[in-house]
Amino acid sequence: MRDKGTCVAFNSEIKIEAKSKSRYVYPDAGVACPRLKESSNITGAITNPRVVVEVTSQQSEGYDRGAKLKYYTAIPTLREYVIIAQDEAWITVHRRDEAGQFLRLEASLESLADSLRLTSIGVSIPLSEIYLDVDLIGI
């Protein structure tokens, strides 16, 4: 993406304007295309994420799979919401369909042999790379 100049990756320092123009959330990472578009309502927030990634813990899982999911899926530019478990090989992908509706669950990956495919940005990442140097439960 960087070489082509088509999208920009961002980290947890960037906040995203969500559902109402007065609410914002901090993702763990994400991608905006073609560049970061700043909010005119919230200083330091962007309005155009294409992909949002949350690394969930036992404490944040309910929020990441509940309220944050609702906030993110209300953002028109968002195409994929990825939830990565921090201590086991488990990645959930919520993806917007061609009609513009978010599918509640598009894919659940649980094997290090699987690859996370982010179709909206044309990227595929093996889970073995995502979980490199991570002590996983049960493996």
Image (cartoon, rainbow, N blue to C red):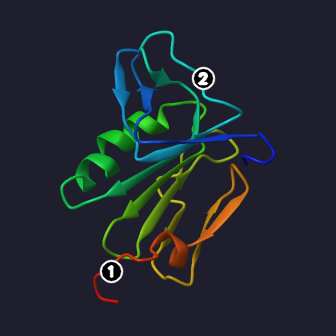
Answer with left or right where residue 9 lies relative to residue 66.
right
Identified by mark 1, the residue type is: Leu
Q: Disc count in the image?
A: 2
Q: Residues within 10 Å of mark 2 (few under 14, many from 20)?
A: few
Expressed as whole percent of the image width and height from the top left, the position of residue 110 reads 45, 78
Which image quadrant for residue 67? top left
**Horizontally, is 67 left or right of 72 in the view?**
left
Mark 1–mark 2 CB contact (< 8 Å): no
Question: Residue 136 has which mark?
Answer: 1
Q: Earlier in the sequence, mark 1 or mark 2?
A: 2
The residue sitting at the top extreme is 40
Query: Secondary structure under badge 2?
Result: loop
Q: Position of residue 3 (x, y in %)?
A: 78, 48
Q: What residue is at 44 percent from the left and 29 percent from the top? A: 16
Q: Quadrant of residue 136?
A: bottom left
Residue that carries the numbered disc 2 in the rendered image: 37
Who's the residue at 56% across and 84% down the image?
A: 113
In the displayed orientation, state which residue is furthest to the bottom.
139
Element class at badge 1: loop
